[in-house]
Amino acid sequence: MGKILCATRGGEESEDTQAKAIALAREQGDELVFLYVADVSFLDRIAAPLVVDVDAELHRMGRFQLTVACERAAAQGIQARAVLRHGHLQTELITVARELGATLVVLGRPREGASVFDDEALHLFAARLRAETGAEVRVL
């Protein structure tokens, strides 16, 4: 049995990615783990008190997004786990994939302009993730 790690951030695109990860877990009989990373690195030039407030809000939002994702999985008969981390998205995704021994990492394809990743950067990161974790990486 393998382990699927599905990065999620909320929004319509994430719902589609979650549904595909749930379907993969069901088809393959794999364990499913959803990951949300509260990443405030975009606030690097902002006053510290604001960063703390935003980090706390992202934490609450992440907990909610993960709860919803796990409930979606449960509605389809899949028991999923949730992991919430704080830090830089790419670093935390690699770290969690290693810690869990993920065999497959599922990444969503954000709509244009809605992410720090353009298509090329996303595929470069997917290659790096594959190289550093040994997991298969699928961009859905």
Image: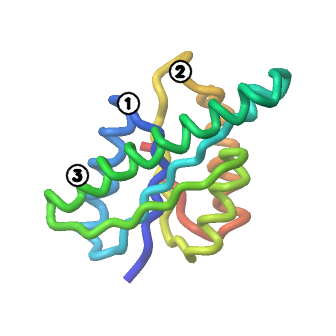
> What is the distance, in whole Å, between disc 2 and disc 3 at their CAs?
24 Å
Nearer to us of marks 2 and 3 is: 3
* Dot 3 alpha-carbon crowd within 10 angstroms: few under 14, some 14 to 19, many 20 or more: some
Instruction: Kindly check if marks 1 and 2 are in contact, taking CB atoms under 8 A apart as contact.
Output: yes
Local SS, label 3: helix
Counting residues from the start of the chain, the first of labels 2 and 3 encountered is 3
Q: On the image, numbered disc 1 is attached to which residue?
A: 11
Q: On the image, numbered disc 3 is attached to which residue?
A: 72
Q: On the image, numbered disc 2 is attached to which residue?
A: 114
On the picture, is 123 further left or further right than 33?
Answer: right
Residue lying at 50% horizontally and 61% vertically, measured from the top left? 83
Q: Quadrant of residue 93?
A: bottom right
- Image x and y of residue 33, in percent: 42, 64
The type of residue carrying mark 2 is Ala
On the picture, is 26 further left or further right than 85?
Answer: left
Question: Which quarter shows the C terminus?
Answer: top left
Counting residues from the start of the chain, the first of labels 1 and 2 encountered is 1
On the picture, is 21 further left or further right than 87?
Answer: left
* Closest to the observer, 23 or 127: 23
* Dot 1 alpha-carbon crowd within 10 angstroms: few under 14, some 14 to 19, many 20 or more: few
* Dot 2 alpha-carbon crowd within 10 angstroms: few under 14, some 14 to 19, many 20 or more: few
Question: Which quarter shows the N terminus?
Answer: bottom left
Is 56 placed above or below 32 here?
Answer: above
> What is the distance, in whole Å, between disc 1 and disc 3 at their CAs?
14 Å
- Image x and y of residue 44, in percent: 82, 28
Structure colour scheme: rainbow
Nearer to us of marks 1 and 2 is: 1
Residue lying at 68% horizontally and 64% vertically, measured from the top left? 95
Q: Is residue 68 visible?
A: yes
Q: Is residue 139 visible?
A: no
The type of residue carrying mark 1 is Gly
